[in-house]
Image (cartoon, rainbow, N blue to C red):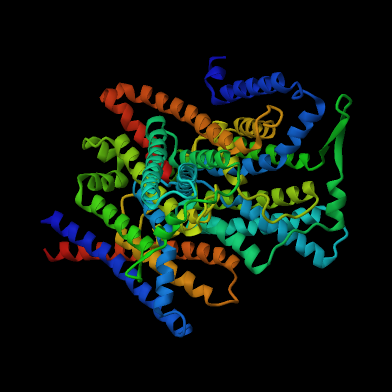
Amino acid sequence: MKKLTRSTEFYIFLVFIALTIFIEIQSGQFFTSNNIVDMLRAMIVPGIFSIGVLMVLVSGGIDISFTAIALLSMYSATKILMIWNYEGNVIMAFIISGAIGLLLGLINASLIAFYNLPTIIVTLGTSSMFIGFMQGILHSRVISDIPKPMLEFSRAELFRVYNKELGVSSGLPVVFLILVALIIIAWFILRYTMLGRGIYALGGDRTAAERAGFNIIAIQFFIYSFVGLISGIAGMTRAIMMANVHPTNLMGMELTVIAAVVLGGTSITGGRGTITGTLLGVALITVLSNSLILMGIPTTWQKVFTGALIIIGTGLSAYQTMKEKNKVHGGMKLGKKGSKETQKNTTGSSAI
Amino acid sequence: MKLNQFKLINFANRDNNLFRLIIMLIAVFALMSTLRPSIFPKLDNFTSMAYQFPEYGVLAIAMMLSLLIGGVDLSIVGIANLSAILAAKLLIKFVPYDADPGYTLLMIGVAIIVALAIGALCGAFNGFIISKFGIPDILATLGSMQLFTGIAIVITKGRIVVGIPYMYSELGNAAIGGIIPVPLIIYTICAVLIGLLLNKTSFGIKLYMMGTNPTASRFSGINNAIMTIRSYMYGGILSAVAGLIMLARTNSAKADFGSSYILQTVLIGVLGGVNPSGGFGTVGGVTVAILILQFLSSGFNMFPSISNLIKDLIWGSALILVMVFNYYSNKRSEKAQISKRIAETTNS
């Protein structure tokens, strides 16, 4: 129990509960069946992204190119299907989009693993390359008549709930299962495989992981290509959910997703982070940004709220870490000076 | 003796970087001049370039300050827009359409001071949450970028702000002696001031030390928290300057102007030899990098077949290429140094 109350997930969970209760009191419409299904629906794409982001952050890196990968693979996969006049199973759309994503992820992976370049700057560069390639070379524009298999799949629902009071209904799309499957896969990798241990070890201390016999290059290759793969799948999921291909509509989501993952207790300097926390972080951000209207807050305030949430949320967990570190270092005769020392350590090491 | 040698090698390396950049600048210039001899090497072209680069040039210096201490400031554009919007709002509110020139000029001065103060405040806020709460710089500035942009959206309701006194943009777009544009002068002042700050003051030396090794700087009695706050605060002031230049150039202000500048300023920093993990980088290198980028971008504009959208692709590839190139050249110079030392020890 003590362990539970000290974990970040627990605090995020409390904040989440408090937020939902607050929204319920304000609007009286939060705990309605259709609103909950709407929230789950809104969580699908950020949820898929967040799994990749979690892996990257745990390994001590940062990837901001995943939305660009998603856009480019979703756009080119749809184009390929259209040229091909494909009419078969929708699985093919996901395979093509995922494969393109994997390929783009490999570009990131080789730059990061072979040249040991700072991950934020590499992915900043590649994301601009991918977007530039899509807009400048492929001349991307909105595709509203998507291929038939995709269109049919976009209507497939797991179930549908009706809200009799308001006379509205909401359905949970089948693509929700993709999120569930990816969560299980990532959970298994991180928890039960040597690769997962390696990802945590790499984020905790690169040199130590190397000395312990982990193949750093192979681990980094896996992480960044895996992120590419699931970004490709996330892009296709988005296209199917919207029933059109909009080449700009995921832009800017990368920052929110990273913030959500960090909010869920993942350390941006690496070595720490869980799937549960990540999903709670995503749920918190999704609920907050989708409930501003329910709370009666004008939409112009949305950015102020996300910004404040990122700063307060990450600030709380960063402050917590700092205090814990100080406790550990307290015995090292550093006294009060020590506290400032570790403080700089946390900010300094985050640069990479 | 050994210390002196070490310094010399260091100096040669740093100079080498600037030397390499200048060669690159000349090469780009020669290339563009031969490809477009009728337009590129003309005074008109240079004047228009001198109007274009200062706004992102000043931002690049701001970005450099954060890269020097191993951070990254994603909020610079947000600060620029917020301070420009506040300055514009202030001018619109207090300067009636038929105000006399003296009063207008006074209010412009006040608006500039307010904008700079807002920039300083925003930057200090960044530095404060980074150093006092231990929020990683990327996240802190990511959050504050949203926050500043969000405040700007709330103030403007997402709309464009127009109708600032004509005199402001006239002043901002003037050219002294008909040749030297005011933005260029502003850029030069900023570059010289930051150059002096980094090279001639104890603050600058401490900043480089902290960027190289925060733990060592802490133990040599430097207050890292104050240093971080000050460096981000200067970055904020520079961002506000860039915002004021943008306000003059476009004669308007909006919450989402210039969002592509973030990537561009990182690219300039890396191209100009700033080490993204902190500790290395000079204003000189950054200035030459800005010029290279401006020459390339103006040059591309002279080819109608290259669309603006491809530019993203070009900048992204350039960033990656420069980093890979730096990787190989660092490796080579390391090897050269090691073999030199081996030769020295065997000789003695």
Front residue (pair A278, B194): B194
Image-quadrant location for residue B228: top left
Residue B346 position within the rendered picture, expressed as x and y whole percent measured from the top left:
16, 64
Left or right, A244 with reference to B316: right
Q: Position of residue B182 (x, y in %)?
A: 36, 62
Q: Residue at x 23, y 47 (%)?
A: B205
Q: Is residue A12 visible?
A: yes
From the top left corner, tell me how far across and down residue A108 is, in percent: 55, 56
Q: How many marks?
A: 0
The quadrant where residue A147 appears: bottom right
Q: Quadrant of the N terminus of chain A?
A: top right
Q: Residue at x 78, y 48 (%)?
A: A242
State whether residue B282 appears in this view: no
Along the line of sight, the residue nearer the viewer: A332 or A210 = A332
Q: Is residue A48 above or below residue B188?
A: above
Closer-to-camera residue (A306/A193): A306
Q: Residue at x 75, y 48 (%)?
A: A237
Residue at 22% in and 65% down: B340
Q: Is residue A20 above or below residue B347?
A: above
Question: Which residue of the protein is positioned furthest toward the top in this rendering?
Answer: A1
B117 vs B331: above or below: above
Relative placement, left or right, of A70 versus B329 is right
Q: Is residue A141 left or right of residue A114?
A: right
Question: In the rendering, at what x and y percent does residue B94 appear?
Answer: 46, 42
- Is B52 situated left or right of A254 in this image? left
